[in-house]
Amino acid sequence: MRRSFTAARSALVSLQVALSLALVTLTVFAIDVVGREIRKGPGWRVEHVALLSADAGQAGYTEEESTRFFTTLLEKARALPGARLVSATSAMPLFDFDFVPLLPEGERLPRGEAPPPVWSASIEEQYFDTMGIGMVAGRPFTATDEPGATPVAIVNETLARHFWPGRDPLGKRLQLLGPSGGLVEIVGVVRTTTLGFPGELPQNGIYFPYRQRPARSMMVLAHTENDSAALVKSLEDLTRRLDPDVPVSNGQTMEKFFGARVAGFGGVMLRLVGGMGFMGVTLTMIGLYGLVSYNVNRRTREIGIRIAVGATYARIMRMILRQGMAPAFAGVVGGLGASVAVWRFLERLVPFAYRVEPRTYAIVVPVLLAVALLASFVPARRAALVNPTEALRCD
């Protein structure tokens, strides 16, 4: 009976170790992703850029009136002291998620299959220059891309390779599906940048001229070689002077915006996985300590006999620690498999550009084994210091 109880406790401790390893691995991975994203950058200009959101729709503007309002706002913003380049977008990467269903002209989807989601934004002509996003082929938008002109679009490299691998996408047309349907001609290709969240795989992206696809809410961006924080205040004051009824929000520097998005993404992962990982490690320590203490108490008489016949302190310590570390090693082996399974499950939910590297396990496994050794050491030391005379009196 005692053996079956001990085996059950050992199995439970092994399970706790396995789950702890998987969760701590994901915690270390989240920290790694945040650090690498900050070092790598999102693919657009982060320094010396001011931004704010203005929502003309909430002030009762129609789409046509919104276009005139933002055109006037951008013209006046370019005259602000320190403003070098100014533009606007309806969807800011890492902030807005506006998707449009589309297919190359003439293609049809099999019945029951949905078109691939494509991140989209309506942008002003100087957007790519302001954001520091390089053109790969074709041309940027111009003031001639207006209502009544040929509907045009610019795609990122990922979308170009997705629909036209090894071919020139310029001049090709895309069919927009849904209520905002119609054909648009591809006039340019730009570099792929981070669109949805830090650490993502390259995503399909498409840009439209905001004169042809107007938006009532826009993010205004201004590049400066001076203090971008001061330019934020100037943009806010200018927008309110043009129309105090237009709500203004999210006034900040791009550095603050990007840092908050990366830290926010990593923070969610760290709080969620890290909290569970901490609880798992704590329960592992408690479980191992309890298991080893139970074994020591149960075998006190046996340990006393061993010491009486000459067993040394080191030998008793090795014996007890070996019994305590056995479920820990079993849990580590199981945890390595569990962490791989958990990672593959998460990849199906949200694809990441990064992978858990071997060096992550090289950090996590020794730390977890050290925790297990610490939890086993105290009861093992107590066993090694037992008085043989008192131990022999135990039942």
Image: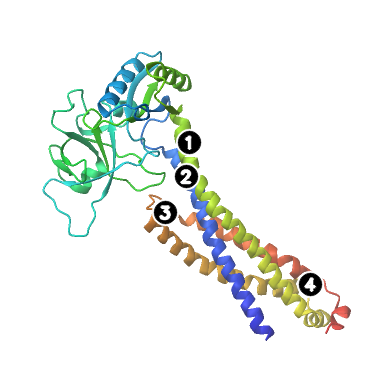
Task: Report the side of 143 relative to 86 (left or right).
Answer: left
Q: Give the spatial CA distance, label 1 vs label 2.
A: 10 Å
Q: Secondary structure at mark 3?
A: loop
Residue 356 drawn above or below residue 319: above
Circle 3 packing at 10 Å, graded few (<14), some (14-19), many (20+), is few
Report the residue at 40% width, 22% height from top: 245
Q: Give the spatial CA distance, label 3 vs label 1.
A: 22 Å
Name the residue beneath numbered marker 2.
Answer: 265
Q: Are dots 3 and 1 in contact, CB under 8 Å?
A: no
Report the residue at 87% width, 83% height from top: 393
> Residue 209, image x and y in percent?
23, 30
Q: Which mark is residue 259?
A: 1
Q: Kindly indicate the quadrant of the structure image that contains residue 366.
A: bottom right
What amino acid is labelled 1 in the image? Gly
Which of marks 4 and 3 precedes in the sequence? 3
Q: Secondary structure at mark 4?
A: helix
Name the residue beneath numbered marker 4.
Answer: 384
Q: Give the spatial CA distance, label 2 vs label 3.
A: 16 Å
Q: Nearer the viewer, residue 356 or 178?
A: 178
Q: Secondary structure at mark 1?
A: helix
> Residue 316, image x and y in percent?
75, 74
Which of marks 2 and 1 precedes in the sequence? 1
Q: Which mark is residue 355?
A: 3
Q: Nearer the viewer, mark 3 or mark 1?
A: 1
What amino acid is labelled 2 in the image? Phe
